Image (spheres, rainbow, N blue to C red):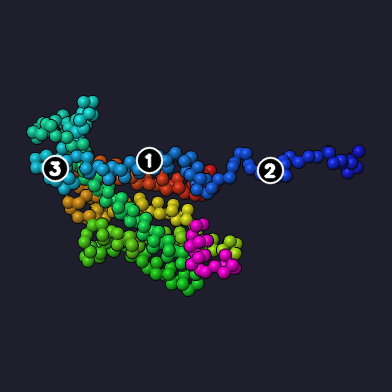
Amino acid sequence: MSIIDHEFYDDDFEFAHAADEKLVDRNYSATSYAKDVWNNFRKNKGALIGAVVIFIIVVMAIIGPSMNEYTYKQIHGGQECLVPRIPVLEKLGIFDGYHNGENQYAAKEVPDTYYWFGTDTQGRDIWTRVWSGTRVSLIIALAAVVIDIVIGMVYGLISGFFGGMVDSVMQRFAEILNGIPTLVIVTLLGMVLPAGITSIIFALMLTGWIGMERIARAQVLKVKEQEFVLASRTLGAGKLRIIFSEILPNILGQVIVTSMFSIPNAIFLEAYLSFLGLGVPAPMASLGSLVSDGYKSMTTFPHILIIPVIVMAVLMLCFNLFADGLRDAFDPKMINK
């Protein structure tokens, strides 16, 4: 007998669940978007390590310069180019103040003195200068993020949403600014502004936000034609409400990721300008100026160069790892690629 000819009765079937029972997926319970982002982020071990190292470096930039009695500009005559010496580790035969088989601290008649990172060619404590310089680099990095979000994101939102002639004019203006070399801008600003952090931040305000603007504009062009934006417009929502209440929340993940990637770029820009002599003025320290100073003594006293290079490289690498983890967390499709 075929299935078509079979006769079914009411008791042949029963409901799997009661009519008033709430059904929840037993394997994947409903979670918020923020929790999904966190769950995806913590699976990336490199990003977690990067976040922890960034936190440690930020803490050291805050408290490091005050952990000893020296200042970043204090010169100690007769104590130039001392190698690192650390109280506990010197008993293990490392960081014991010896250079070329000679105890430099005993030779310079300062046997009870300790410089954890050594001293530079002018007798200044490198430990204090490195963490003071890290503080300067982090200030510039924070300024880059604020500029990206305040100028770049808003500029891209307006340009992408309104389109047409507004978009064309705004993009041509951004292209003109982007065509001016950053080195030229900083040099010109140095003629009218005090050299150092101020001129670098102004240079970032002029051209540093263009990358964020392009990302924000591209995301707006992709989102603004979707159904939820059309529904909001149909219900009578104003343009500003649509931009900041409908479009912005849907592109915020990409904006955050882009702003994180701008941090190592800003740190490298400061180091590059300081290496060329256009960064912070002496005796103020930054990672770039420390690298520039250490480069001159690289062959004879390499610790003056190696220590700030390691701190800067680790800082930039960890920010890249952290930003990469955020990108994967906000876009789970990237995880398996």
Circles 3 and 1, Cβ within 8 Å, touching? The answer is no
Q: Earlier in the sequence, mark 2 or mark 3?
A: 2
Magenta part of the chain: 232-250
At x 25% / y 48%, what residue is drawn? 133
* Residue 240 among those drawn in magenta: yes
What amino acid is found at the position of numbered circle 3 in the picture?
A: Gly
At x 89% / y 41%, what residue is drawn? 7
User: 253 left or right of 111?
Assistant: right
Q: Check the image and report above or below for 278 versus 26.
A: below
What amino acid is found at the position of numbered circle 1 in the picture?
A: Val
Which one is nearer the viewer's eye here, 79 or 301? Answer: 79
At x 28% / y 58%, what residue is drawn? 200
Q: Which residue is mark 2?
A: 21
Q: What secondary structure is marked by label 2?
A: loop
Q: Which residue is mark 1?
A: 52
Badge nearest the viewer, 3 or 1: 1
